[in-house]
Image (cartoon, rainbow, N blue to C red):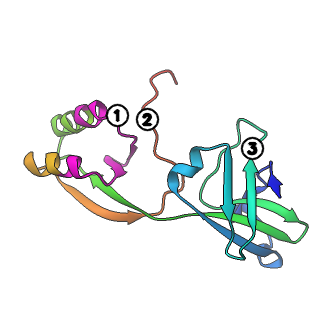
Amino acid sequence: MILTKVYRNVDDIPNIGSYHIETAMVKSDDLMKNILRVKSDHGNEYGIRLEDENSILENGTAFKLDDKKLLVLSVIADEMIEITPRDINEMGLVAHFLGNLHKPVQIKDGKISLLLDKVVVKMLDKHDINYELKKVQLDQPLEYLDLTK
């Protein structure tokens, strides 16, 4: 079965208990794709080909299989580095380094998050920059900085 239209996020579906739900586990970078093949926890295979270019996949995206059945995407937790710079100078140093490596990141609440990378960890240790390693289930994919927006 090819699914072409996102129904909505599972968190926004009223009476969710009235649906039979199949779950497909996906990697966070799969959320950036418009065409995807998934296998559900029921062993069923589905193709996803989004017709609407403005549709986005995220953790909890639901597709209607029929009136009472849904396929819900669940993102596999990633090993992440969460950097907490002490000041604007340290933020600039980290941003410059990560930009040179062309790393996709998420910046939120004064913290920079990115997928685990041993080169980045060595640099953070060398410069005594605060960071934590965490398992994180991303709601949306990490992004490269887009200065055209």
Q: Which mark is residue 102?
A: 1
Give the amino acid type for the residue marked by disc 1 in the picture: His
Q: Secondary structure at mark 3?
A: loop
Q: Find residue 40 and report its horizontal and vertical position in percent.
A: 69, 70
Along the line of sight, which residue is nearer the eye, 16 or 43? 43
The residue lying at 79 percent from left, 40 percent from top is 51
Give the amino acid type for the residue marked by disc 2 in the picture: Tyr
Whether residue 112 appears in magenta in the rendering, the answer is yes
**Picture layout, residue 121 above or below residue 73:** above
Q: Residues within 10 Å of mark 1 (few under 14, many from 20)?
A: few
The reply to whether callout 1 and callout 2 are in contact (CB within 8 Å) is yes
The residue lying at 71 percent from left, 74 percent from top is 43
Q: Name the N-terminal-most of marks 1 and 3.
A: 3
Q: Name the N-terminal-most of marks 3 and 2.
A: 3
Viewed as shown, does residue 24 lie left or right of 81?
Answer: right
**Picture layout, residue 41 above or below residue 13:** below
Viewed as shown, does residue 27 lie left or right of 4?
Answer: left
Q: Secondary structure at mark 1?
A: loop
Quarter of the image for residue 46 reads bottom right
Q: Which of labels 3 and 2 is toward the front?
A: 3
Q: Name the N-terminal-most of marks 1 and 2.
A: 1
Q: Residues within 10 Å of mark 3 (few under 14, many from 20)?
A: some
The residue lying at 79 percent from left, 67 percent from top is 70
Q: Return the residue at label 2.
A: 144
Q: What is the C-alpha distance between the residues marked 1 and 3?
A: 27 Å
Q: Which residues are magenta?
A: 96-121
Q: Find residue 145 and report its horizontal and vertical position in percent.
A: 42, 32
Q: Find residue 96 and report its horizontal and vertical position in percent.
A: 24, 31
Q: Which mark is residue 50?
A: 3
